[in-house]
């Protein structure tokens, strides 16, 4: 049984890969003389194909890596550049060897991951300083890992990245954080006040919102953490929490007076009998969240819908109706006029699943 990195365990591997693994250079020379195409991927198991160089890098077999490179193995394959595999699986000597032979460093793989993140995934933390030294600098490329390290509470990595100028407000969309979250928003979602204060101390901006309009303060409210919400509120501009400013902001939404009065009332929590949601709790008017779905303006009214954190109850100014918005599936469903919705919330909430 052989384990190939994070790919899996296999009972056996093809002979060529076995020779790569054992660094049997004479056998590899024979394969080459017999017409072996050394850049051609080789099937391992039912669903996996690897080039010999990829395999050698994953297994950190330096003699095979050197031989394959000198015989013309492709170092800069589009979906799996050799530099990224090296920083994830190999030591400094291998990394420097590949770069000296033309491996590009400012590259991403098929899932959009760059060198700092790959070294982190491979727990090759010592390679971070080598990556930096080689010119793939944290100030330009370290934001993705900084955001990821927040979720793991890895302060040592965060300190390295911050020291080398990584963007503490990095919020580009990727496969994990499609909602354009900042590291501070990530920490708020983990209800990690210690991490939040650490990030703010190092310059994190509390006013940057996610794609759906949620700022760290809003996230704290959604999570029901009053201490964290008060902390963020104390750091935000005072005008964010002034009623007249909010009313001015909401003018384009043409919010009916009844909804304004409702959201300014005391009881904003409603249990929903015979509904999978269990309950609905609304934001106060001052805390409602304007955002856009495509080019369409929406106003998020719901603070929480039980376990369904990806579904919001919103005001749709275009149709003048209460609607549901599914952030995960990007689906907007008009439900009812406000009066009808309030009169029978359970009925209309259940329509979301029809």
Image: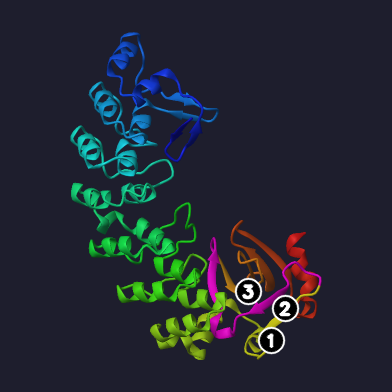
Residue 43: image x %, image y %? 48, 24
Mark 2 and mark 3 residues within 8 Å of each other at the beta carbon: no
Mark 1 and mark 2 residues within 8 Å of each other at the beta carbon: yes
Identified at 45% across, 66% down, the residue is 186
Residue 75: image x %, image y %? 29, 32
Question: Within 10 Å of the Cα at label 2, are there few (<14), some (14-19), or many (20+) other Cα atoms?
Answer: some
Residue 136: image x %, image y %? 24, 49
Q: Secondary structure at mark 1?
A: helix
Find disc 2 in the rendering and name its residue.
338
Q: Earlier in the sequence, mark 1 or mark 3?
A: 1
Q: In this rendering, is residue 253 above or below 76?
A: below
Identified at 60% across, 58% down, the residue is 330
Q: Nearer the viewer, residue 96 or 346?
A: 96
Q: Please tell me whether mark 2 or mark 3 is closer to you in this view.
A: 3
Find disc 3 in the rendering and name its residue.
304
Q: Answer with the quarter of the image where residue 306 lies.
A: bottom right
Residue segment shown in magenta: 274-295
Q: In this rendering, is residue 246 above or below 53?
A: below
| Label placed on residue 258 | 1
Indicate whether residue 43 is drawn in magenta: no
CA gap between label 1 and label 3 equals 21 Å
Q: In this rendering, is residue 120 above or below 279?
A: above
140 on left or right of 216: left
């Amino acid at each position: 049984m052989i384990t190939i990195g994070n790919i899996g365990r296999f009972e056996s591997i093809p002979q060529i890969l076995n020779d790569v693994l054992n660094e049997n250079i004479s056998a590899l020379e024979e394969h080459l003389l017999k017409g072996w195409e050394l850049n051609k991927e080789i099937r391992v198991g039912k669903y996996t194909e690897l080039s010999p160089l990829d395999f050698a890098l994953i297994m950190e077999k330096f003699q095979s890596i050197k031989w394959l490179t000198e015989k013309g193995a492709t170092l800069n394959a589009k979906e799996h550049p050799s530099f990224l595999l090296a920083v994830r699986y190999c030591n400094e000597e291998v990394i420097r060897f590949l770069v000296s032979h033309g491996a590009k460093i400012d590259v991403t793989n098929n899932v959009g991951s760059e060198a700092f993140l790959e070294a982190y995934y491979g727990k090759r933390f010592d390679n971070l300083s080598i990556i930096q030294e080689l010119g793939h600098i944290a100030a330009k490329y370290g934001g993705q890992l900084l955001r990821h390290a927040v979720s793991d509470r890895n302060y040592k990595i965060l300190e390295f990245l911050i020291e080398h100028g990584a963007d503490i407000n990095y919020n580009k969309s990727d496969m994990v954080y499609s909602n354009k979250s900042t590291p501070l928003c990530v920490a708020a979602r983990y209800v990690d006040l210690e991490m939040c204060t650490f990030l703010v101390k190092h310059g994190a901006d509390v006013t940057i919102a996610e794609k759906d309009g949620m700022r760290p303060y809003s996230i704290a409210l959604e999570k029901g953490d009053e201490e964290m919400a008060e902390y963020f509120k104390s750091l935000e501009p005072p005008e964010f929490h002034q009623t007249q400013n909010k009313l001015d902001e909401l003018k384009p939404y043409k919010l009916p007076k009844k909804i304004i009065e409702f959201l300014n009332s005391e009881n904003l929590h409603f249990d929903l009998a015979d509904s999978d949601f269990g309950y609905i709790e609304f934001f106060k008017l001052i805390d409602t969240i304007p955002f856009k779905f495509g080019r369409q303006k929406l106003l998020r009214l719901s603070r929480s819908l039980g376990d369904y954190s990806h579904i919001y109850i919103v005001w749709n100014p275009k149709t003048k109706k209460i609607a549901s918005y599914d952030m995960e599936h990007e689906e907007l469903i008009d439900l009812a006029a406000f009066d009808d919705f309030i009169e029978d919330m359970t009925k209309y909430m259940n329509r979301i699943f029809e």
